[in-house]
Image (tube, rainbow, N blue to C red):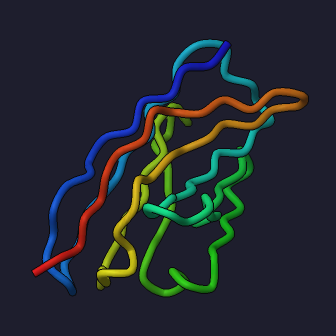
Amino acid sequence: QVQLVESGGGLVQPGGSLRLSCAASGRISNNHIIEWYRQAPGKQREFVARISSGGTTTYADSVKGRFAVSRDKAKTTVYLQMNSLKPEDTAAYYCSYYTYPSTYWGQGTQVTVSS
C-alpha cells in the first residue's frame, strides 16, 4: 500500500505561482511513476505532468513552459511548481502513484486562480 498526501493549494491571482507537494509513504517501489492530474468542476480529470523514478518528466501541452515537476532526493515527495497561473488552471489537483499493477491516489488539493 502507498499513501499520498497533497498540499500547497490555495487562492492565487492570475500570473501568480504556487507549489504543490505530494508526499508518498508506505511501500515505495524503485520503479514507479508519479503523475499530477487536475479536475475542474463539470469537467473530466485531465493529465498535467509526470515524473518517473528515473527522473523523466512529461507535461500536458496546456502547462508546458509554466509548470515544472520535481522531487526530493529521497524520492518520497514530488513537487509541482506552477508559474504564470491562469484562471483556467483552477481545479482540484491530484497526484497518483503507479507501480505495476496498482495505482494509488491522493485526496487532492484545490487551486483557485482568481483576481
Q: Position of residue 32 (x, y in %)?
A: 75, 38
Residue 105 falls in which quadrant of the image? top right
Instruction: Name the quadrant of the C terminus.
Output: bottom left
Which residue is rendered at x = 56% and y = 54% of the image? Answer: 36
On screen, 82 above or below 21?
below
Residue 12 falls in which quadrant of the image? bottom left
Residue 44 falls in which quadrant of the image? bottom right
Position of 17 with respect to 55 (left or right) is: left
On screen, 42 above or below 29?
below
Q: Position of residue 109 (x, y in %)?
A: 35, 45
Instruction: Name the quadrant of the N terminus.
Output: top right
Which residue is rendered at x = 40% and y = 53% of the image? Answer: 92
Closer to the camera in the image, 73 or 106 = 106
Closer to the camera in the image, 30 or 113 = 113
Q: How many marks?
A: 0
Position of 90 with respect to 115 (left or right) is: right
Determine the residue located farthest toward the front in the rendered image: 42
Determine the residue located farthest toward the right in the rendered image: 101
Which residue is rendered at x = 49% and y = 87% of the image? Answer: 65
Determine the residue located farthest toward the left in the rendered image: 115
Closer to the camera in the image, 72 or 50 = 50
On screen, 55 above or below 76?
below
Which residue is rendered at x = 34% and y = 69% of the image? Answer: 90
Q: Position of residue 45 (x, y in %)?
A: 60, 58
